[in-house]
Each structure stands twice: as structure tokens, then as C-alpha cells.
Image: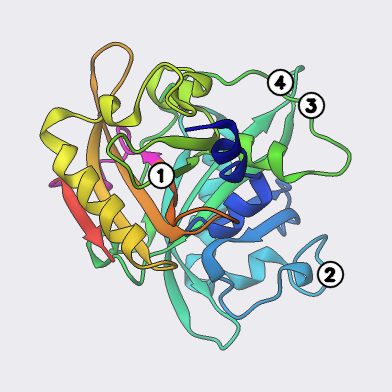
Amino acid sequence: MGDADQNRTAIQPDWLLANVPFVSFICENDAFYSMRFLTFGGGAAFGYNVEDFIDNKHYFAASTTHPEDADIVDAHAEQAVGGGAPVVSRYRLVQADGMPVPVLLVSKAVRGASGSIEALAGVCVDLRGVPALQGPPGLLSQLRVPARQRPATQRPREIDTAWAANELPITSFFVENDEHFTVRKSYGSVEELLGYSAEDFTNARKYKPASATHPADVDIADAYIELASSREGEQVAARLRLVNSDGESVPVIVFARGARPPGAEIGVAGGVLDIRHIPALQGSFGVLGQ
């Protein structure tokens, strides 16, 4: 691939978070979970306007939680503040028309150099198209499972998309629909997930993503990439295993969506969720929803 082609497929964080199949957010650890950054990826706005949530302009984020699930969300935030691997819960989000939507909430605390909590960073995935992941609302992750610690960060005065994307508890990506699933851009911590450097995977500089897929699950990876890239805009989910830098299998769920960057062929935008500490989401490997 020449320089012109690489430039054409350069992926900006704003574009990526607008095309992944989940909501991305940075909020305060306060009673209202006051939103400081919010992006409805893949059109999953649930009938709301993003700007109505920023700085509690017209809505509190907490007000979109089904009343019966408010304790779950509060317990989720408390666990996230406690540290360790990202916290995962199922709960019901009430969309603008009053209908409850089953969602998966994944979040973690963002810590500064002094250890202070700068914010909560998270994603919210609509589960209506993934029946295999639906179930009773509740906390799903095990308590305070140790995680590879990310470097301390300095929260910018005005939160920008690149900073937010790198603080999310899910590794977001855009890959080509080619034989190696070539990564054009990723955000979040590949090091935390697999122990590799993100730079080593970008544009197959050192590693090809296909080489980090468990040999038994290559067909699953092929299937979800092909399915997502064949129907632009539709969500696909898959459960499969990756192989980390120590040679260990890492069960993950991938949420993906066909997306077409400006001037490029359709590829796949999505996120990878580590489920080693989430028994409730583990199970047989394969494509889960489309």
C-alpha cells in the first residue's frame, strides 16, 4: 500500500467513535454522572440529542436509567472507583420515548498522577440485536480483579475525542476487510488487553491482528469481519479468543459495525471487550448477533 492509500484511510478519533456500535462517555463520579464527553456511536442515540446531556444541559445521565436499575448503576460506579479491571453490568436504559432498552455498561475510573479520580470513562452497548448477551440486570464482573495499570493521565481542561478514546475501557478499532484484518487505527489499551504495543499492530508494522487470533477461532474472526463489512451500518457481535504476548488465550467479545471512511473501502469499526473476569458473558465461541 502506497503513502497515498495510507493517507486516504487515516482514521480520526471523531470519525471512529461516531461509527463504532456503542456509546462512549466521560462523566463525573457524582450523583448525576454528569456528562463531560458523550458520543452516540453508530446512530445509537436512543432518541436523545447528545448536547442535551453535556454538563447536564437538559438531562442528567442518571435520569435515563430505569428506576428499578438505579442501584445497579450506583454499585457499578462504586466498584469502578475501587479500581481493578473494568466493571461490567447489564441494566435497562430508558430511551426518549419511554421504552426500556437492555444495555451493557462497561466503565473504569480514570486516575491522575496523584492517584486521584479524574473521571469515569465508559461505553454503553445496545443489546437488542444480541439476544445471546441479554439477561437479568445486575453487576456481572468479579470484584476488583487486578488489571494491567495504564499510565496516569492528565485530564485536559476541555476533553477532546483522542484523549477520551484512549481512556475508554474497551479497545476501539478500525480494520480493513482483508486477509490480515489490517488495523488502520486503534484507541484504548492494546497493552492492557494483550500485552502488545498498539503501534506494532497499526498498518501491520510488526504484527498482523490475524496472528493474535486463536487458531481455532480464525473462522469466527473471518465471519464477523465479512458480515459487518458486507452491510454498512449494522451491528455484529462475536465471542472468540485472542492470544496475548505470554501465549495465553484471552476470551473477548467483539462489537463491530461496517463503516466506510472518507475516500476508502468499507471496513469494520468496533471494540474489543476482555471477558476473562466476566463469567456471565463467557460461553461458546462464534458470531452472536447481527
Which residue carries the number 3 mark?
A: 154
Circle 3: residue type: Gln
The answer to whether 97 appears left or right of 196 in the picture is right
- Mark nearer the N terminus (2 vs 1): 2
**Which residue is under mark 4?**
115
What's the distance in space between the residues labelled 2 and 4, CA to CA? 30 Å
**Residue 57, disc:** 2
2 or 1: mark nearer the eye? 1
Question: Of marks 3 and 2, which one's residue comes earlier in the chain?
Answer: 2
Callout 1, which amino acid? Answer: Glu
Per the model, the C-alpha gap separating discs 1 and 3 is: 32 Å
Q: Quadrant of residue 152?
A: top right
* The C terminus lies in quadrant: bottom left
Q: Which residues are magenta?
A: 273-284
Residue under the image location 48 percent in, 71 percent down: 68
- SS assignment at label 4: loop
Q: Looking at the picture, how far across and down is residue 223, in whole percent?
A: 21, 52
Left or right of residue 183, residue 5 in this image: right
Q: Secondary structure at mark 1?
A: loop
Dot 1 and dot 3 residues touching (CB under 8 Å): no
- Residue drawn at 30 percent across, 32 percent down: 276
Q: How many C-alpha atoms fall within 10 Å of the one at disc 4: few (<14), some, or many (≥20)?
A: few
Q: Residue 81, position in %: x, y? A: 60, 35
Decide if residue 53 is on the left or right side of residue 141. right
Under circle 2, the secondary element is: loop
